[in-house]
Amino acid sequence: MNLSHLIAQGESATLEFKQSFDKEGIETVCALANAKGGKLLIGVADNGDIKGTQVNEETLQNYLNQIKTQTEPSLVVDIESIIHN
């Protein structure tokens, strides 16, 4: 995935930016799942500036668990960490 190209497209019905993962992020995942699917980029400001965020395998697993346990029916999503230079 070309991160810069994706961000340059801007937010849309299938692409959302959040600076951090929180309850609002989970709500966004639900909205995307209820629509046509899509992507949520964590560590990106609404204006497209890449802010970044510290993650490791445990963090990613925690995100997955939060999404699964806080949605009904439980959502299982694909998650990926991207290193941007």
Image (cartoon, grey):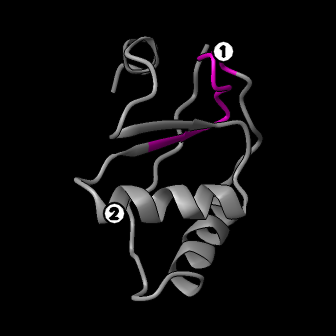
Magenta segment main secondary structure: loop
Give the residues drawn in magenta, as a range.
40-50
Q: SS for tag 2? A: helix
Disc 1 versus disc 2: nearer the observer? 2
Q: Residue at x 62, y 65 (%)?
A: 63
Viewer-proximal residue, 79 or 36?
A: 36
Q: Position of residue 41 (x, y in %)?
A: 53, 38
Q: Position of residue 65 (x, y in %)?
A: 59, 78
Occupied quadrant, residue 69 = bottom right
Where 5 sits versus 25, above or below?
above
Occupied quadrant, residue 70 = bottom right
Q: Which mark is residue 33?
A: 2
The residue beneath circle 1 is 49
Q: Residue at x 46, y 19 (%)?
A: 7
Viewer-proximal residue, 34 or 82?
A: 34
Q: CA distance from mark 1 to mark 2?
A: 25 Å
Viewer-proximal residue, 19 or 79?
A: 19
Q: Earlier in the sequence, mark 1 or mark 2?
A: 2
Q: Position of residue 34 (x, y in %)?
A: 31, 65
